[in-house]
């Protein structure tokens, strides 16, 4: 109990859960940074957590169901973003492949044209 009370002395709870305005959140962050009291004046606290008698744990923490639902939604969004990124990369790859094919064709065409030009000049010189 004493450790919990000491922890509570070091913490100020600020509830801005319903705030969606980014500017208001940033303003609150800046306000709290300005009020920073620095390090807690007392000695560092070390708390040992031991199992209760009989090997059973005393308490268990569970995650907020809303948090779990939001986490699932974020995972779905992340998968969709990865899919879109892969599609974009594939389309860019196709365009680069097309451009390289056109470049190879032009180089081959110019090479054949130059060879024929020199051969034509030699044939005309023989006639």
Image (tube, rainbow, N blue to C red):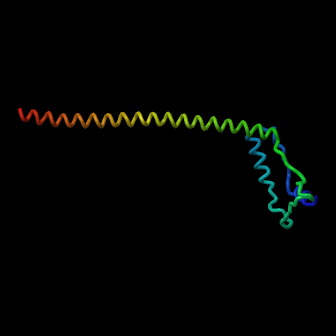
Q: Residue furthest left?
A: 127
Residue drawn 36% across and 33% down? 102
Q: Is residue 66 above or below residue 50?
A: above
Image location (x, y in percent) of residue 68: 77, 40
Q: Total number of numbered labels? A: 0
Q: Is residue 127 left or right of residue 101?
A: left
- Image quadrant assignment for residue 115: top left
Q: Is residue 80 left or right of residue 57?
A: left
Residue drawn 31% across and 34% down? 106
Q: Nearer the viewer, residue 33 or 69?
A: 69
- Image quadrant assignment for residue 52: bottom right
Q: Residue furthest front?
A: 54
Image location (x, y in percent) of residue 44: 83, 66
**Quadrant where the C terminus lies?**
top left
Image location (x, y in percent) of residue 56: 89, 55
Image location (x, y in percent) of residue 93: 47, 37
Q: Nearer the viewer, residue 96 or 15?
A: 96
Q: Is residue 29 above or below residue 81?
A: below
Q: Is residue 83 left or right of residue 39?
A: left
**Quadrant where the N terminus lies?**
bottom right
Q: Is residue 38 above or below residue 112?
A: below
């Amino acid at each position: 109990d004493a450790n919990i009370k000491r922890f509570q002395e070091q913490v100020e709870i600020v509830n801005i859960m319903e705030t969606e305005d980014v500017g208001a959140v940033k303003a609150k962050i800046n306000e709290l940074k300005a009020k920073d009291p620095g390090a807690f004046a007392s000695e560092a606290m070390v708390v040992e957590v031991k199992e209760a008698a009989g090997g059973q744990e005393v308490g268990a923490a569970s995650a907020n169901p809303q948090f779990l639902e939001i986490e699932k939604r974020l995972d779905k969004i992340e998968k969709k973003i990865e899919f879109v990124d892969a599609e974009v990369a594939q389309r860019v790859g196709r365009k680069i492949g097309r451009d390289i094919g056109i470049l190879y064709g032009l180089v081959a065409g110019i090479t054949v044209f130059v060879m024929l030009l020199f051969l034509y000049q030699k044939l005309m010189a023989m006639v």
